[in-house]
Structures are given as C-alpha cells and as structure tokens.
Image: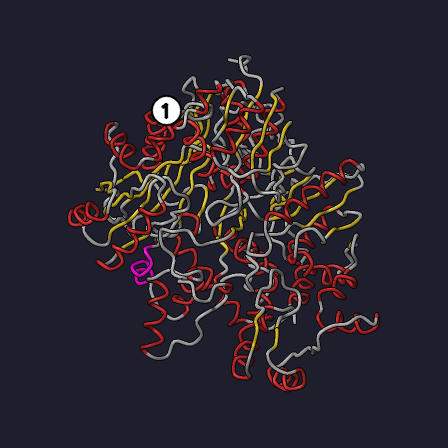
Amino acid sequence: MPRRTDIESVLIIGAGPIVIGQACEFDYSGTQACKALQEEGYRVILANSNPATIMTDPSSADAVYIEPIHWRTLERIIERERPDALLPTMGGQTGLNCALDLVRHGVLAKYGVELIGASRDAIDMAEDRERFRDAMQEIGLEVPRADVAKNLERAWEIQAEVGFPTIVRPSFTLGGSGGGIAYNREEFEEIVSRGLDQSPTTEVLLEESVLGWKEFEMEVVRDHNDNCIIVCSIENLDPMGIHTGDSITVAPIQTLTDKEYQLMRDASIAVLRKIGVDTGGSNVQFAVNPEDGRLIIIEMNPRVSRSSALASKATGFPIAKVAAKLAVGYTLDELRNEITGGATPASFEPSIDYVVTKVPRFTFEKFTQANDRLTTQMKSVGEVMAIGRTFQESLQKALRGLETGTDGLNPVCGEVRSREDRDALHRELRMAGAQRIWYVADAFRHGLTLDDVGELTGIDLWFLAQIRDLVEEEGRLKAHGADGLTAGRMWQLKRKGFSDSRIGELIGLNEDEVRSIRYDFNLKPVFKRVDTCAAEFVSHTAYLYSTYESECESDPSSERKIMILGGGPNRIGQGIEFDYCCVHAAFALKEAGFETIMVNCNPETVSTDFDTSDRLYFEPLTLEDVLAIVDRERPLGVIVQYGGQTPLKLARPLEAAGVPIIGTSPDSIDLAEDRERFQQLIERLGLKQPPNRTARTTEEAVEMAEEVGYPLVVRPSYVLGGRAMEIVYEEAVLTVYVGASVSVSNE
C-alpha cells in the first residue's frame, strides 16, 4: 500500500551524546530517516542532544530540538508540536528506552501519538531477556541455558545451574554495558552487581558460556505484508566472548555451507515474525558450535544498529531510509533501488561480488590504567571498513586504514627465544587484546601451526589459513628482496592487498621507490562499483572501491571537481564533528557548481553515504590510496582541512607528489602543527609564550628540560585531542615518555 495519509508529522528521537557502543552510526541513520520522511511530505520533528551531528542541522528536519533525551523533555516537545507518530528505532538504545518510558508514563496515549517502526510489545519482547528467551523457544529456536535475576541472591541460584564461566547480560543496555564474563565467585559478584545497577529494569540475564563458538549476524528487513529480505550476512572473525563491536567482522559470511546459511536465514525471518517487527530492520545474532554445528540464537535488536550502518555501507542498501518508509506504510516492492536507478525494487535482496572487512579502532593508549583485554563489553571507539575482491585484500586495506602505525600484518612481538616469550605470545592469542590480529600473524612467523593458533584463539581455520598465506608471502618477499620483484610478483602481491609501504619495508626500499617500480610495470588499481546486484544491472551511483583487475568501472567525468578527504575511523579527539565539516563542505561545493568526490573509510558516517557527494571512494586514507584516486579523477584540487589530523598528515606528501592542495596550504598547516615552527612564529610576532624547547631525541629532551625547568608539559607535533600529552615532574618519567611517545609525532 502507498504511504499513510492519516499521519502528517513524525517525531524522531536521536541517540544523544557519543558513547562507546553508540556512535555516529545513529547520526547516519537519523539523517537518512529525516530525509526519507521529508521526501514523502511529512513534517519531521527531531529531538537530539548532540550538536555535532548532521541530523541537528536546521535543514535536516522541520523542527529541531537540541534537548536532553529524557521522557519529561520529550513530553514537553510532544505537548508543543503534537506529532501524529513517534519513530524511536533510529536513536539506538537511547531512543528505544526513551520511547518505552513515554509509553509507560502514558505520554503517547495522552497526546494520541502512535508508535511506528516497532511496537511497544516488539521492543519489550526483544529487549527483555526473559521474554525473548521464551519467545525463541516457542518457535523452536535454541537459546543458551539461562535465567533472569533481579537480585544477587537469585543470581547465585542461577549460577549454580549454568556453571562457570557465566555470561552476564543486563537488560536494556547498550554495547554490553554493565555485562561481562565471570570466571570465579569474586568476578561474578562484581559483574552482577554492576549489571543490576546499570540495567534500567534492574535485571540481568545469566547464561551458559558459549565462549569459542563462531558468531554470525543477519541484517533483516520486513514489511507489513510479510515481505522479508536479508540485506547482509556478517561473520565475526573473533569467536563468542568478544563483543561484536570489538571483533573483526567480514561480509558476506565466509565459512558456512549453503545449507547452514539457509537455516540461519530462515531462523532470522522467523525471529522477526515472532517478535513482531513488521515495519523496519533488525539485527539478529547467532552462535554456532564449531564442533557439531549446533545453532543457537543470542539476541536481536528491533532497530537500526551499528551493524545496520555497516551492512548499509557494505551493500549499498540504505537500511535506515528504507525502514523509515516502511514505518509510514510502504512495502518493499513499492520502493525502488536508487543505486540501480530504479531498475530493481527494494525487495530485491542485495548480492555482492566482493568482500568487506571491518576492523575496530581502540584508544587504550589514552587510558593506560584500563583493562585492555576484550570481553562482552564493548571497548572500541571507532572502526574502519575496507572493500576488496578477496578477504586478504580487504583485510590488509582495513589494517592500513586504521592509522595505528601499521600498513599490514606488521610484527608486534619481537623475538621469541625463551619459554617466557612463548608463554607471553600464547597469552596474547588466548586472551584477546586490541592487537590480536597482529599476534596471530606473529604466531605463524614463530612456527605455530594452524591447529595451534586455532586452539588458542578460537578463530576459524579458514581465516587463519588466509592470514598464514599472507605471512608466507611476506617471508618469500623478504627472502628474494628487490631483485625478485617482477611485474608478475608485484601483481600477485597487490591482488592480496599489500601496500607499497609494506612491500618496501620487507625488501629495504621506501614507499616512493616501490611506487616508481610499480609504475614502471604499468600496474595501477582499477575501481569497481558497489551496486547491490553483483553487476547484474547498470549502476547509476558512483560508489567505488579499488582492486587490482583489468576492467575499471569508475568512468570519471570531465566536470570541474573537488576532492574532500574525510577523517577515517573515529577516535577520542577526532570524531563526528569532523565528518560534519566534510559533509557541509560537500554540500557547499555542490551549490557552487562543482562535482564533489569524497574519500573516507568510516562506515558509521554521513560522509560515506552514497548520496552525500557525487562520487564516493570507500578507501583507506593513505598516500598510496589517495594518489590512485587523484590519478584517476584528476580533480582541480584536494581539500585536507576538514577531516582532522588524518588528512592534515597527508598534505605535505600529496603536495610533493604534485597534487593541488586547496584551502589552507600545506606550509600553513605545518606552521601551525609543528611545535618548533609555531614557537618561532610566536617569537617573530612578539607574543608571549611559556618557555619551551623542541627535542628529537631522549638526550636532547633531558638537556632542554634542565633549561626550561620541571614540571613540564610535553607533547608531540601533529596530534589531536591531547594525544600523548603529559605533565612530567622528573627526568626518569621524561625518559620513559620520550621512548613511548616519539612514534606518535610525524618526526
């Protein structure tokens, strides 16, 4: 049926401030929903408390309220605006919980506001652990043995039944907040007490451990005519026990047979039918026992989620936009696919002919006292997504897109000579931390077998074999050196995702020298389109990724065009506010008559929506990857000043390569960012500044510290958000600081 005419205005609840587990993916979802509903002629009222978001722009909705996301505040907005409907599924857990509060306090009934997108009962059944478990058992789906406790005494009774380790999951919380894995009585009491405190309903689910099982996700969309599609299947490289937000994930699923996949697909649809989600998208999570194939359901989110944003970017299917239109009465077959120019309906299940890998970004260096072991409580602050024709290519592209000082599977553990060294390596494999993928590669370098690493990590042997193959390629490359780098060998390495800088590191050349050799071989990447249909239909949208093949699908225009470099993965100090700047730069350039090209690798953002700019390149923000796009597109200029430190660091090398940098010049950027040059500028201007010096070695630092005098504020150049900045009171601490922090700065 067509859009509903009995409602004229819709209130959308945003997600509020950025927190771990709820980041700018909900700005992306909310912005899409606002745009979709305005397209249909509805008056859109938006409530959100985060001023750094695109959705809180005055033009995003007809009325924007930057107010706390609390039911009392929302009641005042409802009293004033009198919306006909409330859409709560775009604001993460915050939006859902607030909507339920409005229902419980009778606000929606009082003002005649209809809940759309998901009913109260559907939200409650999906989020209430006990009701969800009962519902799944009613439709014949297996769940972990578990029970719900509302106090510590009952929790101990349940623990005696399920045993250790025990998974603790508070109800109605986000990102595993308040939960964890208890291995003993002390941990159990601590985690349960915390979970009861953080759950708004004061209840926790205690379930049997499925640690080490394989974890999968399905992104499902259903309409009120019971049309169901699987938008994307996602496999977690890390096993159960690590929050999916902290796990490396891969789409589509790689290690299931078709029969296993179809069973999971059918189960996902059955879950949505039972819960009652019939006007939108949901995320359904499963675990599979690698020993016997036993399938159990873990949970489902009756709303758009972090995984929904990832699935949207991975497939080109705009889940939030479609979900918003389903919520106002449309069916999937009535909506057209924009990427194929309307040649296919939204009911046409996306098909992809590439592999997408998401790698989380952590910032434990900012919190040195924090426990950096990964558990069921999410700890990552951002993520990077990469697209390649193979898992190996997409993995290596994602790793270099993280901007953590690696350009592939670089060694991290040094020599393994003693038993203590080997035990330390085993610990890193068994108890996952932020660097586990690199320790897996190191394990193969130091002689561990596929089965050894599989037993220690719980990672599927197929993924481990792919990683081992990359390590073996590195070994062969190192052994043969630059003389062995033929055109055929270079082609093979680039097909597997090796960067010029990583190849150079292995054979003793710098990145520029390797690039020169590659150009001599006439080897350059081509660009393929994300089209939702594996090239079955013509794509009218320039949503592109690089790979090494023969046919290029980029088809650049001859228009006047400007390229904008985005901010890469979110981190503390560089987040959603820079994406806001990039998006508005794209809008302004469009208005000025330029074709806009966006380059970014963050799947959570509005800037990586395929219709924010004229052309989107989902690529790592490295010199090699950006130069390849510049070479293909030939823009009039590249803007680096909107994406935070990420593009600023590329300004000088891009300029050196002949790329026209417009806006703030690379020299002006360097003048502001380089501590020594900035100090000299202040002196020339005759302005006051604290006594300071710039050091490049430990010896220089100690000597200059004596001149300036303790205590000292020490910080590197080219950093954001106070990263690696400390107050130092004595020489011993200064020496440690310089050793640990020198790599943070460009110099």
Q: Position of residue 241 (x, y in %)?
A: 33, 52
Q: Residue 370 placed where, x, y %?
A: 42, 63
Residue 478 at x, y percent in the picture: 52, 70
Please name the residue shown 72% across and 53% down the image: 641
Which image quarter: residue 559? Answer: top right
Q: Main secondary structure of the magenta part?
A: helix
In the image, residue 454 lies in the stretch drawn in magenta = yes
Is 141 situated above or below 480? above
504 relative to 420 in the view: left or right: right
Observer-nearest of 497 and 164: 164
Badge 1 amino acid: Gly
In the rendered image of this protein, does residue 661 appear above or below residue 311?
A: below
- The magenta-colored residue range is 450-458
Q: Position of residue 625 (x, y in %)?
A: 64, 54
Instruction: Report the quarter where the C terminus lies.
Output: bottom right
User: Colour mode?
Assistant: secondary structure
Taking the magenta stretch, the answer to whether it contains residue 495 is: no
Q: Residue at x 29, y 59 (%)?
A: 455
- Is the residue 407 above or below the residue 530 in the image? below
- Residue sitting at x 83%, y 72%: 686
Q: Quadrant of residue 37?
A: top right
Nearer to us in this view, 610 or 354: 610
Residue where numbered disc 1 is placed: 276
Locate residue 536: give its quadrant. top right
